């Protein structure tokens, strides 16, 4: 009977091994912990379980997958930022070219005494004063749109 109870106690201890830790407070009120007993130390039992290699491997794989995902996201953000910068440069260059063209057209319209519209047969149709004023106003608007 005693032998069976000893075996039961040993089996229970094998499932969750316990380690002894000792806690004490010194004269200055500082709390200390140790694995070796000291006079007036309180014994604290700490239960531990063996490491499960499968769980550790699964956690490492999950962490590696998260790192890879973060790296991919960071590289995509870098690529997106570069593409946006490239698009912004392209748009700025387009605006500058359109601005220069609009300014040149306005300068031509303001200095010319007569403007014409080319016809399909190679002839010219000269604009009336009213049409000339409208063309100049449209050229000013174009300059404001592209340069403003």
Image (cartoon, rainbow, N blue to C red):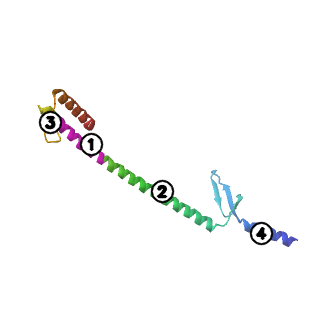
Q: Residue furthest top?
A: 130
Membership of 92 in magenta stretch: yes
Q: CA–CA distance between discs 3 and 4? A: 102 Å
Question: Label 1, on which residue?
Answer: 95
The quadrant in which the C terminus is found is top left
The quadrant in which the N terminus is found is bottom right
For marks 4 and 1 on the same chain, the one whose residue lies earlier in the sequence: 4
Say above or below: 104 vs 75.
Answer: above
Q: CA–CA distance between discs 2 and 4? A: 46 Å
Whether residues under marks 2 and 4 lie with C-beta atoms below 8 angstroms apart, the answer is: no
Say above or below: 24 vs 112.
Answer: below
For marks 2 and 4 on the same chain, the one whose residue lies earlier in the sequence: 4
Q: Badge 2: how crowded within 10 Å, few (<14), some, or many (20+)?
A: few
Question: Label 4, on which residue?
Answer: 11
- Quick one: 56 or 84, which is closer to the camera? 84
Question: Label 3, on which residue?
Answer: 108
Q: Identify the residue shown where x is 79% and y is 67%.
A: 9
Membership of 25 in magenta stretch: no
Question: Label 2, on which residue?
Answer: 70
Residue 147 location (% of width, % of height): 25, 37
């Amino acid at each position: 009977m005693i032998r069976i109870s000893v075996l039961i106690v040993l089996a229970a201890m094998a499932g969750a091994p316990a380690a002894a830790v000792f806690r004490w407070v010194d004269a200055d009120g500082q709390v200390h912990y140790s694995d070796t007993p000291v006079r007036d130390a309180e014994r604290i039992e700490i239960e531990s379980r063996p490491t499960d290699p499968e769980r550790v491997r699964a956690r490492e794989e999950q962490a590696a997958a998260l790192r890879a995902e973060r790296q991919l996201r960071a590289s995509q953000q870098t690529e997106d930022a570069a593409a946006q910068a490239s698009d912004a440069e392209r748009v700025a260059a387009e605006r500058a070219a359109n601005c220069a063209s609009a300014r040149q057209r306005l300068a031509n319209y303001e200095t010319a005494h007569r403007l014409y519209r080319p016809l399909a047969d190679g002839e010219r149709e000269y604009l009336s004063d009213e049409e000339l004023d409208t063309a100049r106003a449209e050229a000013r608007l174009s300059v404001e749109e592209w340069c403003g």
